[in-house]
Structure formats: C-alpha cells, structure tokens
C-alpha cells in the first residue's frame, strides 16, 4: 500500500524488535554472565518493548491494514503465513504495553535475584511469540507462534528456582500446556484432513465452495479441539484450571504478563481463525451447528465460574487469577456474538476490553508484586490498612479494582458497557442470556473487588508492619497503569475506533 | 468553558491536595475550593440562560464536543446550566468550601487524603448538575459514590465499615437498576435518537415515546422504565422504605461528609427525578400520581416520627432529612409551577439548612464527644454562639418565616393543595402539613433537653467555646438561609423559568 514506503518485511517490525531485544539480552548475558546490572537489563527490555509499541502505534496511525478505496483489504503479508493488518497491530500494541510495564516493574522485583538476563530475554521471547500470534494467519504459523510464546512462559513461571510454589506452578503449567498443545495440533490435523489446507483463507475457500462436504464431522471435531487450544491460552473453561496455580506460584510480574498479554494473544488467534477460516453460514451447513454456540456456552460458564470462585478466595493473587478467568469470559462474548450483523461491535468491544484489561489487570498484579516486594503477606487480611503507609499505590489499586468491576469513572466501564450493548444489539436469545450473565457477574465482581479496597483503605493497619519503601520501577509502572486506566475513560474514542475498524476489516 | 474550569480546578486541586503534606492540606484545600465557589457565584450573576435545559431552553455556559461514536449512538461531552441547575451548582461549591473549613477541627488523621477526596467529590457533583449527556452524567453520578464510601469508611465512627458498605451497596444497586432501565428506553426509542444527549431523548419521549424493546410494547416499556428509574432515584433521595442506609451513613460519617451527604448528595436524587422522570414522562407522572404522593406523605410523616424517637442528635437531623425530602417529592408530583418550583427551591434551601444543622451538631460533638440528648443539658451556658446557631438552624428547619425553609415549604404546600393532576391533593397536602408539627415537636424537645436548663455533661471533657473556624461557616450558612428567606426571588425566578416548560409538555 502506498502509505507504506518501507520494505515489506518491515511491517513485522513490532515483533522483530521484540526478538532483537531478546537476542541482545542473550548476547549481553553471554559476555557478562554474572552481571546483575538491573538498570541495563530492565532498561533494554523496557526500551525494546516501548520501541515496538511506538512502531505498532505508528503503523496503525499511518494506516497499515486500512481497507483501501479500490476494495482491497490493505493488509501486508511479508511472508506466507504472517499478515500485518489492523487486527495484528492492535494486539501487538497490547502485548508491547504489557511487556513494557512488567519490564519496568521487574527492575525492583528482581533485585538481588540471579538469572536476571535470562528472565528478561525469556520475557522478550515470549512477547515475540505473542506478537507473532497476532500476525499469524496459517495454522502452522499460529502453532509455532503459540509455542514460541508458551515455552518461555513455562520457564518464567518456574524462575524462582528456590521457591517450591514457583517450581510446582511451572510444572503444572507445563503439563497442562503440553496437553492442550497436543489437542490443538490434533485439531489442526483434523481441519487439514477435512479441508486439505492450513492457510486460513484457503480453508474458508474450501468450506464455502462446499468441497469438504463429506467431512463435516471431522471438521466439527477439529474446530472443537482448536477451541480447546484457545481456551488454554486464554485461561477459559475447560482449560482454565492451570491459571490460579500458575498465577499464584509465578513471580507477580509474570502473573501480570500471562494474565494480560498472553490472554490477549490467545484471543487474537481465536478472532483471526474464526473470522477468517470458518465462515459462519458455510460452516453451519457443513457441521450442522453454529460454532458461536460453543462460545456462548463457554462465555457464560467461564465468567460465572471465574467470578464465583474469585468471590470465595482469601488469597489476593488467587482472587485476581480467578477474576482473570472471569474477564476471559467477558472477552469470549466477542466470539459468541460473531454474526454478520453487528458482529464487529461485539468483537470490537471484546478487543477494547482486552486493551483496557492490559492496563488495569497488569496494574492490579503489579500491586501484588509490590506487596510481595514489601513482604506483607498474601491474604486480604495481610493487606489491611496499607493505605496508611502507601497512599499513592493504594489509590492506584482503587482505580484498578473499580475499573475491573466496570464502575465509572474508569475505562473498564466503557469496555464493559460496549460488550453489554453489543450483545444486546445482536438480539438473539442466546446473546441476551449472555448479556444478562455479564450484568449479574459484574455485580458479583464488585463484591470481591471492593473487598480488597476495603482491606487496604478501611481496615485498621496491622500493628507489626515494618517501614514500606517506595521502589521506583514498581511505582512507576503502577502509576502509569493507573493514569492510563483513568485517562482512557476520556480518550476512549481512538481505541473504540481502532478496535471496531479492525474487527470490521477482519469480518469483511 | 466556565463549567470545565470549575471541574478542572476541583480535580487538579484534589490531586494536589492528595500529595500535599498533611499539615497544610486543610488550608490548601480550602483555598482551592474558594476558586470554584467564587467562580460559580460570578456565573450565577452572569447567568443568561432561559427555559429548561432539556426542552429547547437557552443554556448558559454550554459546551459540547463529540466524545465517542459507537454503533448508532454518539456520546458527547455536553454540559450547560439552566435555572434549575445553577442554584444547585452554587449550593455545591459554597457548601464544599464551608464543609472543608468545618473539618479543620474534627479531621486529624490522613488529612491530605481526606481533603483530596472532598475536592474530588466536588468536581463530580458539579458534573452531575451540569452534564446533559446521559453517559457523562452517569459517570459523574457514579464517581460521587466511591469517594463518599471512602470518607465514611475511613474517617467515620465506630460502625463505619458497616455504614460505608451499606451506603455503597444500596446506592450502587439503585444506580444499576436506573442505568439498565434508561439504556433500555434509549434502545426502545430506536431511530428517533442518535445520541445520548438528554435534550434529544426528552424531545423523542415527548414526541411519542418508544416503539418497544425486547418484546415489550412501547407503553409498557415506558411504564417499566419510569418505575425502575423512580425506584433507582428513590433510594438516593431517600424515601421510605429505601431510607435505612441514610441514618447509618449519617451517624457514622464524619461531620463534613454528613454536610455534603445531606446538603448535596440527597439532592442528586431529587434533581435526577426532576430531570428524568418528571421531565421525560409526563404521562406516567399523571398515572402514578397517587402512589408517588402517598410515598411522599409517608416519608414526611414516618421520617418525622422516626426522628421523634431518636436520642442521638445526628440521627434526629438525619431522619428529618427523610422528612424534608418527602416535601420535595410532594412538590414534584403536584406538577404545578409552585409545586415543582417550590420543590427545587426546597432542594437548595434544605441543602443549606441541613448543612448548617450537621455542622452545629458536629461542633457540639467536637467539644463534648457525645451526641446523645440524654448525656447533656444546658449547653447554651458553655457554647453560646454555636448553640445559638443550632437554634437558628432548627427554626429554619421548622419553617420560620423569613428563612428559606419557610418559603420552600410554603410554596410546595401552596402548589400541591390545588394541584389539578393529583387526585385528593388536599388530603395529601394536609397530611404532609401535619409533618411540620412533628418537626417542631422533636426539634424543640431535643433543644429543650440539650441546650437549656442547668449545665450538665456525662462525658469527661472540658467544654469551651468553639474555635472561630468552626463558627464562621455556620454564620455564612445562616446568612444565606436568611437571605434566601427574605429574597427568594434571587433563585425562584430562574427556577420557575426553567420549570414552566416541563409543565407545558415542552411548549413555552
């Protein structure tokens, strides 16, 4: 496209920059393996993520992937199997934001820790994988990107080698990950068997041409297995149960990373596969049922299970882990409502929610990181009265909690409202039930989110708590996340436009 | 631009105060709050609007910018003032300044956070009274809740946690009901509205109303929405039987929070009733006139009876607010110029009078550390000035001529007695008038026991004269109350100007 004067492979720059940063960190580690120069390592990682973010924003603003006047889709496909369009750039932005935030926060969290260079390079490698997931449009590249994101994540969860919880969490995460990868690959092979293609647009062409008519059952089974793979990556039912274990055992910044960026990346492949490869009408004729029905059920079950489980937790990190499952349920509404009429609004709303979630959920987990840094403990009671000693961080926590609950005046209100109206706008009975579930769950979630607010602000401080320091990196990341969560309330227009445009282009 | 400046000063002031040292926070917040107070007084003198903001009136200080466009509806930053809202904005800014000054004595813990929250509430209250887009209005509306929840929860009395959560749950559930109902209404209006601007929605309502939504007929939908919104706002007002959060919140809240709660937050409910229910649904107002009038009269009598049974001074004033708000509802449902105009006048008047009463009770409590009528007598002996003001405020409450309470209640009775639209209006009005007798009864009874007679105090505190900065705000309030009583046309003229179009169904 004309706006884009750079070589085509440069379109992948957001992912390439992440990869280059990871490699640079490896090089640094091999030159000086014992170095614990935190500012250099964290600075490099954060810098790489920010450059990636800047490039992705620049591409979006410059109009990469915008449908052209002559009817073209406007996307750039530098390599067969990787496409850069609005959808890809949008999710690359989310990944880069979360990566930058947790790189900055890890500066303090990892103080005095060995394996620092490894930590940052693994984070950047996982981020590379997530960015590529955003761009992958063939089942093979999707799987490769998925594994590139997953393998470093297993290591990151277990990186606190002396901590039993961390190692155990890493192992659980790995085992379930391996299982779901196997299911996912099996699903790919079934889809390939039914259609003879791996490239998403070719799959769609075969289905629409009716050439796979005799393999309807096979294809249906394949789709179901693919859904299993997404469910794992997005921490949705039925592959959600690793999330509380992994998030609780992992270092808190990694929990933030997995629950925000990794979840978003899981959603982008789901969006791309289901908008591109399996056209709703043609697939229904083939397999006899709408695949949206699966997502309707998953959305309701996931949000309800996540929220009810979160309401019963005593451990803050586990509460956030279950709340993260609940939010996966909200975002699944975007897939459940993927019909031709009004689908772009629902999918766009889910994308908006994931971006806002990238700030508010990352911020909430980083507050837990801060609490772990202080060593105040893990339960709600341990957090009692923290605001007396750390008012600014606790003010930020209030922002995150109420935004997660979807209460104004925070950005989470918009995305939840748009999910709600989007679902209502579809008008089908199933989507009305989904909308009802969203309201009930939101009301319930206010209970446990405000419980944390009550603990830090209203309860009396614990008597024997030491002096709490103010680590620069963690504070900076938390404050940036909080400011963005508030600022996006006012500046939601560009995000809403970008998300709905990307969704409309993907559905076209 | 002026409204934006008011809100911005309060918001930025809140942030500055939040990070300022505790030592200077009170004085700093007071200085900051003087800016909106003075500016709003200037706006009051320069007010050049006419008519009703929702019904083709000329707005003062109007500004409108597109905010979001999603699907078919646009959401905008749309603020402006008419004769109903500007007195309430002035009430807010003045009361906040005085409440801040009155907190210098009782608030001695985490001052910067306290005053920061008060200024934050001020910004949102100004927003509530000036916003003319539903979403903008709702964001401000909800944003008032969180800081008030914290003010009660952190700085409140012994049962503060219970009171804070009760306040939060009651008002939030009410907001949710109201929000859902209104959104359904807007969707039901279909193509006749393209935005959430309240004037546009009001026009569409008066030009035929909704076609139906989710299987409900247009007229059924209108009735359901009217009832749901009435219930939502009724909790906020509050009317019997939704009043039980109010005494708890008031008794536990620190004095300045009580001042704002009774003075301004309750008026949010009646203001919203006037703006939404009584402007957009003239047909339903007529249909439901009798039940609403019954609720109003029950609130008046039952609230006053409850006040009669209390021994805690603050509880007495709190329950009497329920009674006074009943008059406002009665005036609204009368649907005559004097009824609705008097109700609006009573909102402003009661804001100042109840603020004064809570301040006076607070000053006595600061000195005696008790609020129980049975614990003290002869306070006039030790605190002549503060007690004198308390007596003056009580007479204002009872409706002494030449004080604003008299004019408000008199016009309401006058307007309600001959109301054509309200069946049995004479019966309702006569019953409500009887409330005045009970008010006089409990106030005089409480005063007689606490203020007069020989000095006696059950607690071991040395009672001396109240400091100047406690007394000054009360004198200012008393001055305003008398000023409005002597010259009610200062605001009554602009109020009736804005009320008339409502009663004429949108025609001037």
Image: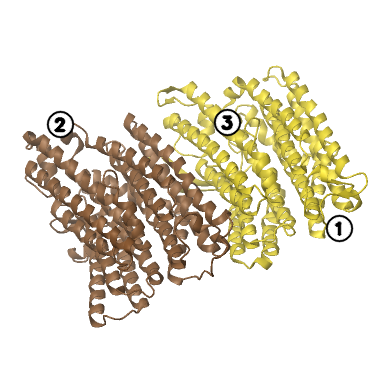
* Disc 3 from disc 1: Cα separation: 46 Å
Q: Residue at x 44, y 29 (%)?
A: B188
Residue B310 locus on image (x, y percent) = 76, 37
Mark 3 secondary-structure assignment: helix
Image height check: is A6 above or below A351?
Answer: below
Mark 3 / mark 1, whichever is N-terminal:
3
Report the mark closest to the observer, 3 or 2: 3
Chain that the image shows in brown: A
Task: Report which residue position mark 2 lands on.
Answer: A285
- Side of B62 relative to B88 (left or right): left
Mark 1 secondary-structure assignment: loop
Report the mark closest to the observer, 2 or 1: 1
- Are dots 3 and 1 on a single chain? yes
Residue A437 locus on image (x, y percent) = 39, 36
* Disc 2 from disc 1: Cα separation: 87 Å
Chain that the image shows in yellow: B
Q: Is residue B400 visible?
A: no
Task: Report which residue position mark 3 lands on.
Answer: B231
Is residue A326 or residue B397 the one in the foreground? A326
């Amino acid at each position: 496209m004309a706006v884009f004067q750079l070589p085509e492979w440069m379109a992948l720059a957001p992912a390439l920059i992440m990869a280059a940063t990871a490699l640079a960190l490896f090089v640094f580690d091999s030159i000086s393996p014992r170095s614990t120069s935190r500012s250099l390592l964290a600075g490099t990682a954060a810098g790489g993520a920010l450059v990636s973010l800047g490039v992705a924003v620049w591409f979006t603003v410059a109009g990469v992937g915008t449908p052209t006047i002559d009817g073209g889709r406007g996307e750039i496909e530098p390599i067969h199997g990787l496409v850069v369009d609005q959808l890809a750039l949008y999710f690359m932005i989310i990944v880069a934001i979360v990566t930058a935030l947790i790189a900055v926060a890890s500066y303090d969290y990892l103080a005095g820790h060995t394996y620092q260079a490894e930590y940052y390079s693994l984070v950047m490698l996982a981020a590379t994988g997530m960015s590529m997931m955003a761009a992958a449009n063939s089942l093979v590249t999707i799987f490769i990107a998925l594994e590139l994101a997953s393998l470093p994540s297993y290591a990151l969860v277990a990186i606190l080698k002396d901590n039993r919880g961390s190692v155990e969490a890493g192992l659980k995460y790995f085992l379930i990950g391996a299982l779901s990868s196997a299911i996912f690959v099996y699903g790919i092979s079934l889809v390939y068997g039914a259609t003879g293609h791996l490239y998403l647009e070719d799959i769609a062409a075969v289905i629409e041409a009716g050439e796979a008519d005799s393999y309807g059952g096979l294809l249906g089974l394949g789709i179901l297995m693919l859904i299993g793979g997404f469910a794992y990556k997005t921490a949705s039912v039925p592959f959600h149960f690793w999330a509380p274990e992994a998030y609780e055992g992992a270092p808190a910044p990694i929990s933030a990373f997995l629950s925000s960026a990794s979840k978003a990346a899981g959603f982008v492949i789901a969006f791309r596969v289901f908008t591109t490869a399996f056209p709703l009408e043609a697939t229904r004729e083939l397999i006899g049922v709408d695949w949206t029905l699966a997502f309707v059920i998953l959305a309701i079950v996931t949000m309800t299970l996540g929220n009810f489980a979160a309401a019963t937790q005593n451990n803050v990190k586990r509460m956030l882990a279950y709340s993260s499952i609940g939010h996966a349920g909200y975002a699944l509404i975007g897939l459940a409502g993927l019909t031709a009429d009004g689908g772009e609004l629902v999918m766009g709303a889910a994308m908006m929610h994931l971006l806002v979630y990238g700030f508010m959920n990352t911020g909430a987990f980083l507050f837990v990181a801060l609490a772990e840094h202080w060593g105040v403990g893990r339960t709600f009671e341990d957090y009692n009265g923290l605001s007396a000693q750390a008012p600014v961080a606790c003010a930020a926590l209030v922002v995150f909690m109420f935004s997660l609950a979807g209460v104004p005046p925070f950005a989470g209100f918009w995305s939840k409202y748009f999910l709600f109206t989007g679902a209502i706008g579809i008008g089908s009975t199933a989507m009305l039930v989904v909308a009802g579930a969203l309201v009930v769950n939101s009301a319930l979630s206010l209970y446990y989110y405000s419980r944390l607010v009550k603990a830090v602000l209203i309860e009396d401080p614990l008597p024997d708590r030491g002096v709490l320091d103010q680590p620069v990196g963690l504070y900076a990341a938390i404050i940036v996340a909080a400011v963005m969560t508030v600022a996006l309330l006012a500046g939601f227009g560009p995000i809403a436009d970008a998300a709905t445009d990307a969704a409309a282009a993907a559905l076209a | 631009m002026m409204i934006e400046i008011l809100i911005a000063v309060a918001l930025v002031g809140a942030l500055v105060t939040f990070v300022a040292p505790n030592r200077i926070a009170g004085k700093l917040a007071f200085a900051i709050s003087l800016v909106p107070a003075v500016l709003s007084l200037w706006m009051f003198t320069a007010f050049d609007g006419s008519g009703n903001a929702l019904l083709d009136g000329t707005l003062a200080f109007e500004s409108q910018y597109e905010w979001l466009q999603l699907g078919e509806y646009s959401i905008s930053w749309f603020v402006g003032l008419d004769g109903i809202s500007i007195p309430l904005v002035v009430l807010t800014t003045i009361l906040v300044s005085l409440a801040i000054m009155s907190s210098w004595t009782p608030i001695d813990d985490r001052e910067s956070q306290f005053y920061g929250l008060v200024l934050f509430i001020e910004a949102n209250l100004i927003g509530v009274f000036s916003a003319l887009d539903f979403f903008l209005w709702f964001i401000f509306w909800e944003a008032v809740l969180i800081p008030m929840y914290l003010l009660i929860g952190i700085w409140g009395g012994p049962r503060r946690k219970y009171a804070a959560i009760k306040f939060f749950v009651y008002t939030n559930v009410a907001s949710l009901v109201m929000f859902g109902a209104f959104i359904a209404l807007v969707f039901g209006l279909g193509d006749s509205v393209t935005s959430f601007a309240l004037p546009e929605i009001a026009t569409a309502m008066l030009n035929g109303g909704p076609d139906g939504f989710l299987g409900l007929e247009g007229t059924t939908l209108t009735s359901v929405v009217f009832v749901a919104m009435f219930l939502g706002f009724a909790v906020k007002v509050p009317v019997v039987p939704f009043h039980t959060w109010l005494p708890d919140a008031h008794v536990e809240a620190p004095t300045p929070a009580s001042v704002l709660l009774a003075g301004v937050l309750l008026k949010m409910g009646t203001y919203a009733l006037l703006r939404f229910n009584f402007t957009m649904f003239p047909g339903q107002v007529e249909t439901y006139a009798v039940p609403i009038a019954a609720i109003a009269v029950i609130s008046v009598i039952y609230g006053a009876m409850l006040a009669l049974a209390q021994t805690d001074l603050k509880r007495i004033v709190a329950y009497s607010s329920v009674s006074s708000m009943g008059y406002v509802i009665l005036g609204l449902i009368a649907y005559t110029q004097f009824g609705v105009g008097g109700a609006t006048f009573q909102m402003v008047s009661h804001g100042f009078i109840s603020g004064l009463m809570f301040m006076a009770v607070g000053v006595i409590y600061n000195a005696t550390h008790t609020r129980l009528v049975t614990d003290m007598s002869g306070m006039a002996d030790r605190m002549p000035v503060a007690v004198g003001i308390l007596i003056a405020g009580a007479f204002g409450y009872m409706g002494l001529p030449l004080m604003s309470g008299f004019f408000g209640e008199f016009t309401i009775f006058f307007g309600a007695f001959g109301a054509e639209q309200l069946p049995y209006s004479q019966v309702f009005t006569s019953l409500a008038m009887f409330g005045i007798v009970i008010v006089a009864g409990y106030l005089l009874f409480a005063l007689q026991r606490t203020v007069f007679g020989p000095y006696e105090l059950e607690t071991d505190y040395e009672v001396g004269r109240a400091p100047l900065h406690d007394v000054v705000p009360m004198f200012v309030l008393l001055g305003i109350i008398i000023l409005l009583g002597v010259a009610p046309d200062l605001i009554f003229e602009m109020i009736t100007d804005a009320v008339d179009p409502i009663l004429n169904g949108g025609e001037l």
